[in-house]
Amino acid sequence: MKTIIITEGKTKIETPQPENFRTRAGDYAPSLTKVFYNPLMEFCRDISISVAQTAARRFNGLRVCDPLAGVGVRGIRYANEVKGVTRAVVNDFCREAFELIRKNVTLNGLTGLIETRSTDANILLRENRGQFSFVDLDPFGSPAPFLDAACSSLGKRGMLALTATDTAPLSGTHVKTCLRRYGARPLRTEYCHETGIRILIGFAQRLAGLHEMALTPVLAHATQHYFRIYLAAERGAQRADEVLKKIGYLSHCSSCLRRSFTSGVATALPQNCECGEKLSHAGPLWLGKLIDGDFTREVLQDLSLRDFRLKHQELSLLSRCLEEAEGPPTFYDLNELAGQEKKSPPKMKDLLTRIRDRGYFASRTHFSPTGFRTDAPLEEILELIGTS
């Protein structure tokens, strides 16, 4: 196996050199290899460093676990670049990956801080019940098989970070797969990626409830081919009950584009829209906020001080997330609404200003370049588009 040493953030990593490897993330097309490293995820990992640093300040230190580590880049970067990490466990079941993890730990002078393991991720997490304050699940595909064990490994307070690359089932392309994997029905709409993230959050929250643990999202984003979610964890039956009250269903009308929300998992859902057409439903899913404004501001501040190669893109994404943080669930697509009115779409900036002038919340959304989030009634939005 040919290898190459690269630098990500302040961390050196020895990784396999697949065919057509390029040191610039945008030029890399992953090839089949048993030892996994994806430079396209550098963007995500950079943000994770600032999230972990923010969490370390809030929790007075971090005990980190990277149970699906590949070459170990995530876990090693946490130990190397986040102040306050007191313990880090970096694991991969693949022996070739494990050997590279050990080399990379030594390469960065972290043998005293990082424990390396090569075992099944679920076994590792269950062996460390209640021992970690930051668990990062970054699988190839769905995090669902590891979520229950990850919840058990978290202490009284902590954070669970999730990556999901099975965006097609969560976004409504493969409905049966989503039902099997997450116990929820997706829906193919203009805001399907947001729906997918909300389904994943709701699934994680229901599993956490088995452990009398509340999981509350502090930051979530859809980028390229993956969803990324950070959930603050807190043990306590009462707190878990409060979170579970915000799980429910969304109902969507494909004719007039109205959407409504129903809280509660065991509840009757409306069948017909105000316009008379039949409604489609998605859920159960999380209906609360996806982004905690205070937390995200701290992440932005930390990120702005770091020397990351992709920092401008990362700051732009987090700024947009912060802009939409206080908005309601789901968003509208400007082009689709303009099509309803048989009008050319107005400038996004002008429309948002006119909506705000009427006293409503209005922002762009990171989910779509033509999407906007508002609590204004649909009739008023269409009126503004029609008179623009």
Image (tube, rainbow, N blue to C red):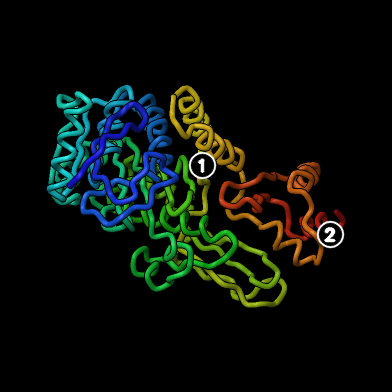
Numbered disc in front, either 1 or 2: 2
Q: Is residue 139 rendered to the left or right of residue 381?
A: left
The x, y position of residue 377, in whole percent, is 73, 56
- The residue located at (22%, 32%) in the rendering is 88
What kind of element bears circle 1? loop
Q: CA distance from mark 1 to mark 2?
A: 32 Å
Left-right relation of 286 to 234: right
x, y (%) of residue 165? 38, 56
Q: Amino acid at mark 2?
A: Gly
Name the residue at 17% across, 47% down.
1
Residue 295 image offset from top left, x and y in percent: 48, 32
Name which quarter of the figure residue 161 lies in: top left
Residue 70 placement: quadrant: top left
Which residue sits furthest right?
387
Q: State the SS at label 2.
A: helix
Q: Earlier in the sequence, mark 1 or mark 2?
A: 1
List the residue tagged with mark 2: 386
Residue beneath disc 1: 291
Which of 204/339 is in front? 339
Question: In front: 301, or 111?
Answer: 111
Q: Who's the residue at 59% across and 40% down the image?
A: 320
The answer to whether residue 205 is seen in the rendering is no
Left of 250 or right of it: where is 372? right
| Residue at point 42%, 65% (across, down) | 169
Classify 200 as above or below 313.
below
- Amino acid bearing label 1: Ile
Residue 75: x and y in percent read: 27, 36
Residue extending farthest front: 20
Q: Quadrant of residue 168?
A: bottom left
